[in-house]
Image (cartoon, helix red, strand yellow):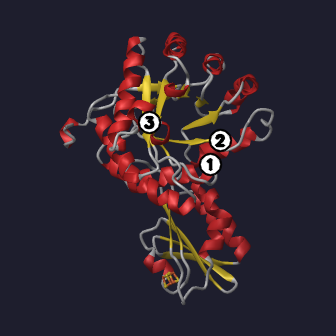
Amino acid sequence: MTDTTASSIKKPKVVMVGEVPLGGDHPVTVQSMLIVPFSGRLEGLGERFQAFKALGCDILRVAVPDMKSVKDLPQLVRLAPFPVVADIHFDHRIALAALDTGIAKLRVNPGNLGPEWKTLEVLKKAGDKGIPVRVGINSGSLPQKVKDKQDQASAMILAAEEEIEIMEKGRFYNAVFSLKSSDVETTYRANELFACRYDYPLHLGVTEAGPLVEGIVKSTLALSKLLARGIGSTLRVSLSDSEENEIITGKSILRALGMSTGTDIVSCPRCGRSTFDTQAFLGAYGDRIRKSGKNITVAVMGCTVNGPGEAAAADLGITGEGNHRMIFRKGEILGRFSPEEAVRVFFEELESS
Ligand code: SF4
């Protein structure tokens, strides 16, 4: 029986992913994964990457399914303003080739790389090049011998133990682990057990978490419980949605836990008194607000009667009625503007915050 009291949680050692440190006392980082193939489709990726970065993406993972993708990896790495992680399954030759492309980390599931010597070959080369490896343990693809264990979290720990044995046999210690399940409690338990036994940094996530709303709920439940206990060095919120929404959710979880800075948006749900469409305004300008990088609270409120007062704590706010918009700071009205003028003034105020 593993002791899972607070004092038994091990402080993770530091693993460098390019310039980004994971573990130690370093801030928890946010990751996402490119949801489309990139091979032969690099055009426009540079701008998208800049947008990911502005929203708070610290590390990006890309699937590298074949040698054609490996060929395009160096160019993708050059376009990326953050470290790139290559995700490899099944073919260790792809992993070996990817290690020469400028990637900052390799993500493998050693269980599906074939015989042990293939994994050792990959680890040897990663070790020689100083590139860390994330070992991904997913409840859906556990090795046969642990698969039938009743307790999924314990089965995942057994699978991790096996991987650690192989790694350490190859004198490889520059690793990050992830233990993901689509079940919230299993994800929580597996990561808790791991953190009480090993000091490898943990990459947190709920796998196949679902569409936007369901995925956010499950991920927030599992991840916030772990992070609040000091477990986890990096995270990815997996959603059947855009990379942008994964990043925004990850950043929001960290900010709500007081573990990250950035622009916090508060907005009212609207009610029968509503005179301003908060949803439409946030749909049009939400990302621009988030990308400002300002450590302030921005309020988008649905009526001029209650909005400025209810959001009196916000550093900057906007509401409206009919053909005018009202901009306020700390509840104090700065002025009334036409809709077009209000957008300009609002972002000028944001920039000067
Ligand atoms: S700010 Fe106005 S519109 Fe929004 S919930 Fe409050 S009363 Fe309703």
* Rendered image: mark on residue 274: none
- The residue nearer to you, when weighing 132 against 111, is 111
How much space separates mark 3 and mark 1, taking CA atoms?
Answer: 19 Å
Identity of the amino acid at label 2? Leu
Q: Residue at x 60, y 56 (%)?
A: 351
- The residue nearer to you, when weighing 15 against 277, is 15
Q: On the image, numbered disc 2 is attached to which residue?
A: 34
* Rendered image: mark on residue 243: 1
Mark 3 and 1 residues: CB-CB less than 8 Å, in contact?
no
Mark closer to the chain start, 3 or 2: 2
Q: Report x, y in % for residue 59.
A: 55, 36
On the picture, is 173 further left or further right than 346? left
* Rendered image: mark on residue 178: 3
Mark 2 and 1 residues: CB-CB less than 8 Å, in contact?
yes
Mark closer to the chain start, 3 or 1: 3
Q: Report x, y in % for residue 152.
A: 37, 43
Mark 3 and 2 residues: CB-CB less than 8 Å, in contact?
no
How much space separates mark 2 and mark 1, taking CA atoms?
Answer: 7 Å
Counting labels gives 3
Disc 3: CA contacts within 10 A as few (<14), some (14-19) or many (>=20): many
Identity of the amino acid at label 1? Glu
Local secondary structure at mark 1:
helix
Mark closer to the chain start, 2 or 1: 2
Local secondary structure at mark 3:
strand
- Location of the N terminus by quadrant is top left
Relative to 317, does residue 16 appear above or below in the rendering? Answer: above
Q: Report x, y in % for residue 220.
A: 43, 55
